[in-house]
Image: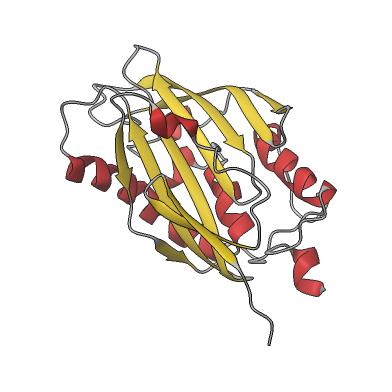
């Protein structure tokens, strides 16, 4: 019998485990250290789909006006303005200059407004976003960690940092994030195949899917297979 060593560390209110020696530091959510930021950890949620599907949904803006009506979007404002996706120097992807009109995209938002977004994915199954109303309200930072249970079942961990929010109690901030996650879950679970196709010819993509396309290419380029159609065939 051979002994297996592992390292565990608490970071961002979540316990992380690595079997063997960690290859990278847990530094992918620096926004958690912003002075005065209020951290809200959602209870982990089981999503009956693959981890890459869960991450890709998190990175997508086009569904806001159809899945999150009245919060992150409305049918009358369904267009996704163009944005850019770049590779970040230390590995991963970042979507910049993202904007979307949202009726209540920030806790306590008083009326509809354009919301500025930055998305980032560094480890393949961990994604982050920063969003801020054009009026200067404190930013909201969210980290999603998609922890695979099987190829087609995922445990989703969501951590949010709310800047300069002294109006809402923790329960209100928790409920705001949980409502959005619960709206996403049945949509992600309905996608077929449950494993993410990395062949870009399998599913139709539009200009607004620039980040999704880049994410699939990035996974394919590194040979990442878990939760993808290619990995399920191995």
> Percent from the top left, x then y, of residue 186?
45, 62
Q: Is residue 108 left or right of residue 68?
A: left
Viewer-side residue, 83 vs 42: 42
x, y percentage for residue 88? 70, 28
* Residue furthest bottom as drawn: 1
Q: Quadrant of residue 234?
A: bottom right
Residue 73 is at least partly visible in this image? no
Q: Residue at x 64, y 30 (%)?
A: 94
Please report the residue visible at 25 percent of the width from the left and 40 percent of the height from the top.
173
Position of 218 compared to 42: left or right? right
- Given residues 160 and 83, the one toward you in this image is 160
Q: Quadrant of residue 133?
A: top left
In terms of depth relative to the viewer, which is nearer, 136 or 203? 136
Q: Is residue 46 left or right of residue 118?
A: left
Above or below: residue 22 compared with residue 209: below
Q: Locate the N terminus by quadrant.
A: bottom right
| Residue at position x 63%, y 28% in the image | 95
């Amino acid at each position: 019998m051979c002994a297996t060593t592992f390292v565990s560390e608490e970071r961002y209110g979540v316990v992380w485990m690595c079997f063997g020696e960690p290859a990278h530091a847990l530094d992918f959510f620096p926004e958690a250290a912003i002075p005065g930021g209020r951290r809200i950890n959602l209870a982990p949620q089981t999503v009956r789909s693959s981890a890459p599907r869960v991450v890709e949904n998190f990175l997508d803006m086009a569904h806001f006006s159809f899945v999150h009506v009245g919060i992150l979007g409305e049918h009358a404002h369904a267009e996704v303005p163009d944005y850019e996706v770049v590779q970040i120097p230390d590995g991963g992807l970042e979507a910049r200059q993202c904007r979307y009109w949202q009726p209540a995209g920030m806790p306590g938002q008083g009326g509809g407004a354009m919301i500025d977004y930055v998305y980032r994915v560094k480890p393949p199954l961990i994604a982050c976003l920063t969003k801020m109303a054009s009026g200067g309200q404190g930013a909201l930072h969210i980290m999603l960690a998609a922890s695979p249970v099987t190829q087609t079942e995922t445990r989703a961990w969501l951590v949010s940092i709310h800047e300069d929010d002294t109006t809402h109690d923790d329960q209100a901030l928790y409920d705001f994030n949980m409502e959005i996650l619960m709206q996403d879950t049945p949509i992600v679970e309905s996608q077929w195949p449950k494993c993410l196709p990395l062949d870009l010819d399998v599913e139709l993509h539009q200009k607004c899917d620039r980040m999704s396309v880049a994410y699939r290419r990035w996974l394919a380029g590194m040979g990442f297979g878990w939760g993808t159609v290619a990995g399920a065939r191995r």
